[in-house]
Image (cartoon, grey):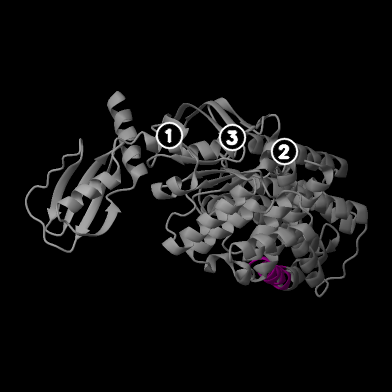
Amino acid sequence: MSIAISIKNLQKTYANGFEALKGISLEVRQGDFFALLGPNGAGKSTTIGVISTLINRTGGFVEVFGRNVDTHVYETKLDLGIVPQEVNFSLFERVGNVVITQAGYYGLNRKLAKERTEKYLRQLGLWEKRNDRSRTLSGGMKRRLMIARALVHEPRLLILDEPTAGVDIELRKSMWDFLTEINANGTTIILTTHYLEEAEQLCRNIAIIDNGEIVENTSMKHLLAALDSQVFVLDSRDAMSGPIDFSLEGVYANVVDEHSIEISVPAGISLNAVFAEINAKGINISSMRNKSNRLEQLFLSRLQRNVIEA
Amino acid sequence: MYGNHKLIAFETIVVKEIRRFARIWLQTLVPPAITIVLYFVIFGNLVGRRIGEMAGFQYMEFIVPGLIMMSVIQNSYSNVVSSFFSQKFQRSVEELLVSPVPNYVILSGFVVGGMARGLAVGVIVTSLSLMFADLRIAYPLVTVSVILLTSIVFSLAGFVNAVFANSFDDISIIPTFVLAPLIYLGGVFYSVELLSPFWQAVSALNPIFYMVNTFRYGFLGSSDVDIVWAFLILGLFSVVLYSGCIWLLRHGTGIRQ
């Protein structure tokens, strides 16, 4: 499978001397759903800014579908769709015009621009709002409008910078479904997000960026397999007291209150075995949940390791 | 980008620009019309009657070309500076910057947008002037070409201002402190013959002086300046400003980090 985007030794130092990117290298395969994670100020948006040419890089180079962004400006930009973090359309334009205008910038004739505008506004649930001024849209609608705008020229690579930030959970799920569908139809997607659950649900490969450096770049499956243990919170209708010891190696329980316990289960230990022992102890479990998102644990551990190494 | 794609992109920018100033016509088209009517009534009619003739023409006839030119200059400039800066401010300019539209198409789109507003106001002002003076155009080709070139020059100048502007204050400084004095001292209301040789020499350094006088020549057939020289100055300004704007766009000055 060919490479959708290749970034080599990308560097960016801002005028105030801040080194936002310290020579990062990345490759994303065509058809991939790729997550770029990192804390605030890690360099995610700078990376996207450089790819989209909104930020001038200090060093390195970027290729989109094998073409250099400097020498093949037209082709590479045609292949890219960008959904930025902040709203960046004219708030005085009508919703439909925002998308039609963008289509015009990509050279789509009026008829095709109108067809595509209708197609994507309908898919994103904004068709009924097409004649409204864009400033009247809610936050979630504005984000969906930016997605429709980015897709109107049907790019092969879609880059979304925190597209679901501040969006309610129902809408977030519908946006996940939409993105999964367009990815299944062949569009390569790169996503930055603060919702680690989102990356875990959607993405097949992941890179973690911190302090302008890539600290992890692997498949989601591989990354999650590296988890040493998972912590579950178990609720019981019966009151529990005192320490609860497990004979299973590495399994520890901590009583949080009289109706809930936290159990740490190392990788390789079957949950069936854990539940068999819980059963044997006469504890009736009414519900169970992960204490924290699995990816979140890994994310924090990678960042912590990066700080220690630094 | 293919030729027809560039044409569609150019048309998109121009239509967007025209739609913008047409949507806010109360702010863009009406105020210059009111201002110019006041000039016609006060300076042309009331004061002009006492002045009598200027450079061999009725005072009203004399000031009409200058007032039309003044409107075109101000509106071409302010359309581009306010539109491009507000797109920078709202970050909607990023829509253009991430797209494959070449820099010269972006610049041409904004310049034609500026010209459209400048010329629209010029037509309104010219129509209003017909209520106050009998207009005749001695050299239509000169009149049209000088107004088009002037409109291009000031649209380009507005673009430069917008690129460097960081706040709304920055887009009003040049029109207020540079453009207005140059226009008023550019011979809109008087003939340079009235000035002492020293101030005539100072006036010769003012590029707007050449534009106003060449435009007046197109109407009245009489001018304080050499027409060929005036066209050379206009051409030079157009080329220098256009090249400067392209350079600014290529380097991303004020628009790319």
Q: Amino acid at mark 1?
A: His
Kindly state the secondary structure of the residue where label 2 is placed: helix
Classify residue B60 as left or right of residue A241: right
Q: Position of residue A7 (x, y in %)?
A: 56, 29
Asked if residue A243 can be seen in this view, the reply is: yes
As drawn, the residue found furthest toward the left would be A242
CA gap, disc 3 and disc 2? 21 Å
What crowding class fits label 3: few (fewer than 14 Cα within 10 Å), some (14-19), or many (20 or more)? some
Looking at the rendered structure, the kind of residue marked 2 is Tyr
Tag 1: Cα neighbours inside 10 Å, few (<14), some, or many (≥20)?
Answer: few
For marks 1 and 3, give the CA distance.
Answer: 17 Å
Task: Tell me the subunit letter for badge 3.
Answer: A
The location of residue B201, given as percent across then percent down, is: 72, 40
For the point 70% across and 50% down, which residue is it? A153
- Tell which tag, 1 or 3, sits nearer the viewer: 1
- The residue that label 3 is drawn on is A29
Q: Nearer the viewer, mark 1 or mark 2?
A: 1
Which of B148 and A234 lies nearest the eye of the viewer?
A234
- The range drawn in magenta is B27-43
Mark drawn on residue B104: none
| Viewport quadrant of the N terminus of chain B | top right
Q: Can residue B81 be seen by looking at this rendering? A: no
Write down the chain letter for disc 2.
Answer: A
Q: Which residue is identified by label 1? A: A222
Q: Earlier in the sequence, mark 3 or mark 2?
A: 3
Specify whether A271 is left or right of B202: left
Judged from the image, the secondary structure of the residue bearing numbered disc 3 is strand
